[in-house]
Image (cartoon, helix red, strand yellow):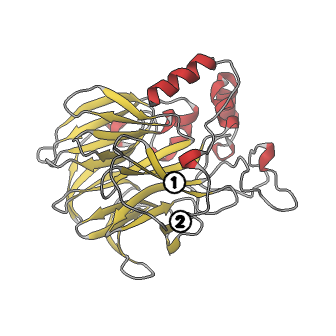
Amino acid sequence: MAGLGAFVRRLFSADDAGISVPAMDGVFKPDNRLEEAERLLLLPAIDNLVSSPAGLLCSSGKTLFQLDSGGASVSTVAIAEFAAPISFVASALDGSLAVGIEGEGVRIGQPGASKRIDLPGDMASCLTAGVFAADGSLYVCVGSRKHPARDWKRDLIEGGSSGMVLAIDPANGSHRELAAGLAFPNGAVMLGNGHLAVSESWRHRVVVIDPKSPHKVAILEDLPAYPSRLSPASGGGFWMALFAPRRQLFELVLREDDYRREMMATIDPAEWIGPELAGSARPDQPLSQGSVRQMGVLKPWAPSRSYGLVARCYDSGLPRESWHSRADGGMHGITSVCEHDGRVYAASRGSGTLLRLPGATSGGSPA
């Protein structure tokens, strides 16, 4: 069905035709449930929520934390410190961890007793996500081979598609290419059939890869926002974080090659037209006319550069439910979502807040 929809859009919209982005409608109809979620913890740059046998984990900059989420509030304990920012965390069934370190590569093992997996330099600088399979294999997403993880916006503006997925053997550190030519793979989760689902941010979709074959199939396309990390959901399916909205202004800039090149060459990256993890009140920030404050108020439906969005999907990729923080909200830049002990948590990197989602329910694939 996703493929048919893409075909129809291409049939009636040539590259030089009018610019459109998918409407937030149907399953993605906006609500305020992320704004109404429990705000458990303030932690700058919170990211990489992971459920492990040791408990709920998260990262913030160079530090890996264990979270005690038993009560109404959450306490943190730093369990590991690294030389560079953490770019992903994955947990195996036996409790061992894989931690991506920006510019260094992957470390596998227990906190404080891990070994380094050597990767080529152009693969080690932008490790965005990882997941262990049932047999102990580790699959890792390399968002870009041209830019480090912190330069994700530059990769988007340049139309980057140098990303790849690696299969790593934790025992001997060997690795092989599973898929290449991806436009910033940014999340990974194992499906019930043993296949790997990967979010492809710059193509606004989720693809499925059979680890035994290089062939990949899109199961969810033309999303209204840029997808990020994926994680398993109880009862089947997966959770998906979407870190920023798609806007017509962004799509226009991405089409205009001369404009993009001049913008990158002459303007500070903080002022580039494109998505953001959080809103800004700076007067020099680019915006669409609909984002102009009227009488000091920003409308919830304004075409903002940042947004908060979490979705739950079936194994088939069909979205089932969504949680939003709209333009006038503050829980933007959702980069990670994770289910732990029957509760669902989300990391709003834009606001540095750990959220516990209201109304999250379990369920498997539709008939």
Residue 115, given in percent of the width and then of the height, sits at 19, 54
Q: In percent of the image, x 69 and y 20: which residue is there?
A: 17
Residue carrying label 1: 322
**Which residue is nearer to you in this view: 194 or 110?**
194
Dot 2 alpha-carbon crowd within 10 angstroms: few under 14, some 14 to 19, many 20 or more: many
Image quadrant where one finds the N terminus: top left
Left or right of 176, for residue 125: right
The answer to which image quadrant residue 326 occupies is bottom right
Q: CA distance from mark 2 to mark 1?
A: 21 Å
Name which residue lies at 16% across and 38% down.
Answer: 174
Is 9 on the left-hand or right-hand side of 73? right
According to the image, label 2 marks what residue? Answer: 352
Given residues 330 and 168, the one toward you in this image is: 330
Residue 364 x, y percent position in the rendering: 33, 52
What's under tag 2, amino acid-wise?
Gly
Vertically, is 2 above or below 140? Answer: above
> Circle 1: is it few (<14), some (14-19), or many (20+) Cα within 10 Å?
many
